Image (spheres, rainbow, N blue to C red):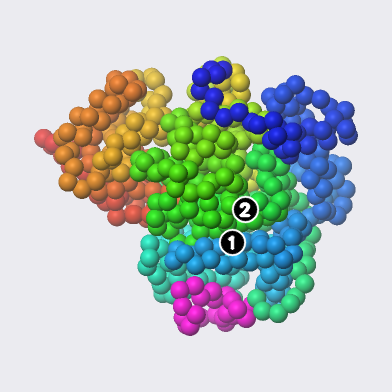
Amino acid sequence: MSLSDVIWEPPEALVQSCGLTRFFRFLEQTRGLHFDGYLDFWRWSVADLDAFWGAVFEFEEILHDGDSSVVLADASMPGARWFPDVRLNYAEHLMRRSLGGETAIVYEAEDGSVLEMSWAELERQAGALAATLRRLGIARGDRVVALMPNCPQAVIALIACASVGAVWSVCSPEYGLSGIVSRFEQLEPKLLIAVDGHRWNGRDHDRSEQVAALLAELPTIEHLLWVPQIAADTPAPSGPPVTAWLDATEGHEPLTFARVPFDHPLWVLFSSGTTGVPKGIVHGHGGIVLDHLRAGSLQFDAQLGEPTLVVATTSWMVWNVHVSGLLAGERLVILGGNPMSELDRIWRVTAQQRVGRLGIGAGYILASMKADLRPAEQFDLSSLRQIGPAGSPLPADGYHWISQRVSTEVWPAAGSGGTDVCAAFVGGVPILPVRAGRMQAACSGVAVEAWGEDGRPVPPGTLGEMVITKPMPSMPLFLWGDRDHRRLKETYFSLFPQAWRQGDFIEFDTDGSCNIPGRSDSTLNRRGVRIGPAELYSVVERFPEVTEALVVGAELGDEYYMPLFIAAVEHVDESDLRTRVVAAIRDALSPRHVPDEIIFVPGIPHTKTGKKLEVPIKRLIQGVSVEEAADAGSIDRPELLEVYAGLIAHRRAPGA
């Protein structure tokens, strides 16, 4: 471990008071266990899953019926069975730390207006909505789908749905119709909750026609719950019976909870769907309760009543994780509309709402760096104690920027997980230092390793496939429509039948810290040397003329073609910028990193959750059609795929 790259050390007050230390004391007092530091504890947590997760269950005082003595009845992957004799409810745990008249949710709309909702009002509206759901015939196992942006109504709807034991799924309204239908039609839903539209970048986007078209594509819908967002009098589309949101949430009905089996489906999250029909990933009540409580307490030190802001859309699993902040009694700070309608908006709201934990995309930190924002000089960020970069790797200079421009006292608690488990595999540890460019360690209870192609662990400092060798409570119960686990096995267990392959490359150091340079299916392999795309982005995207970049490596028979696509500001001198980018890559990285070609494009396409479409662009280069490469409904700017296809075809033309 190099001391020179340590940019944060945990203060002694945090070490003594954090949830992880309290758990250590609990284990010593109740089990007689003592550990020589975090890594010793982590090794025990994955060596004895029954003991670890059983202790978490007891430490978190899980509300339940039944016998919790049997922890892991079947350790198969897939098909693990956790706490088979336990019944509980996710929504009950969200609401159990209610602070009555204290604020539970703060919502800032894009126009700057602010709505505050107390715990008591959150419970009242969720109770009324749950009663409405029961009157509409929604029962355990019924699917409720929602077309909603990040707003308080979405949180209320999830709580009400989970409280009755129905299965929840939500999609953000900026998705195209095909992207929504390809997800929701799989579930054969009984109820649709839909907004009339949403505001983005100062414009109202009416979605009434989209909702009407969606109803026509979902014949199983028996009722529409209509949620006006852009106008109170927007008429609902014709079709099934309609209940207005205000009517559905009026009155005072007690919020009750149907305790369901530990593995009862809670929600269905969907994969990006860029390369095929989106996978419906089913998580259970118990697995999410247990894993999210463990993460909040032991890894990220969530605090009762602390304002927490996580920037996410409802289609990204990070939104679900943010809502789970209620498990610890956190105050949810929600940004409506475009969180970056003004570049400093997130920092401003962080200061105004006295946010303690901030979850933002690594891209936002890099954008703040490029714009030379100085948040600590502009705003009072004295309440901010933790920043959790997510979505993509944050390079080392991003960590240094946090230390220099935000605060040396802010804990950069980066983590990496996935929609697949709706949890982190590696992440924050409140008692360990942070090294620039590296995540602190594997999460407790997560048997994560780096493997080579031979299916064996690689030495420290070596890049390998990220694998999970033992089950986690939040692993999918199944993929929707895949009860025999055939598709799940093909997705996660085809390379290593004995271990879950996440699809990321990871490298661990001897101190337990790790680096994830990118997806293993998008990692570059230049003459036998693996190169993470993030390495190139950290160099190229520093140029003020570069708005964003995308690099891919495509096997074309015996040839390996590695183009770099650059979206630049207007009127840039492309020849000059190309020369300077090549020189910077060569100097900062190596000649091996220099792309075969630099192609200027009008923009970089992403999934709706903001991930660059490296693999679909690679497939375009390898000759598949635009339709085969990606589902247009899952992409933020699908028209760009035709642009890329045209550029690629032009370069393949004879004489090009």
Is residue 66 or residue 57 the one in the foreground?
57
Query: Is residue 84 within the magenta segment?
Result: no
Q: Secondary structure at mark 1?
A: strand
- Give the answer, above or below, for where 647 lies relative to 260: above
Q: Are marks 2 and 1 in contact (CB under 8 Å)?
A: yes
Q: Give me the disc on residue 106.
A: 1
Residue 472: x, y in percent?
A: 68, 39
Q: Check disc 2 and report its element: helix, strand or loop.
A: strand
**Gap in Å between the C-alphas at discs 2 and 1?**
9 Å
Binning the other alpha carbons within 10 Å of mark 1 as few (below 14), some (14 to 19) or many (20 upward) gives: many
Which image quadrant for residue 33?
top right
**Residue 430 seen by the camera:** yes
Q: Which residues are magenta?
A: 224-248
Q: Is residue 239 magenta?
A: yes
User: According to the image, label 2 marks what residue?
Assistant: 307
What's under tag 2, amino acid-wise? Pro
Q: Position of residue 325 (x, y in %)?
A: 65, 52
Expressed as whole percent of the image width and height from the top left, the position of residue 306 reads 66, 51
Q: How many marks?
A: 2
- Residue 51 relative to residue 403: left or right: right
Q: Residue flagged by tag 1: what amino acid is it?
A: Val
* Vertical side of 523 occupied by 289: above or below: below
Q: Quadrant of the C terminus?
A: top left
Quadrant of the rendering where the N terminus is positioned: top right
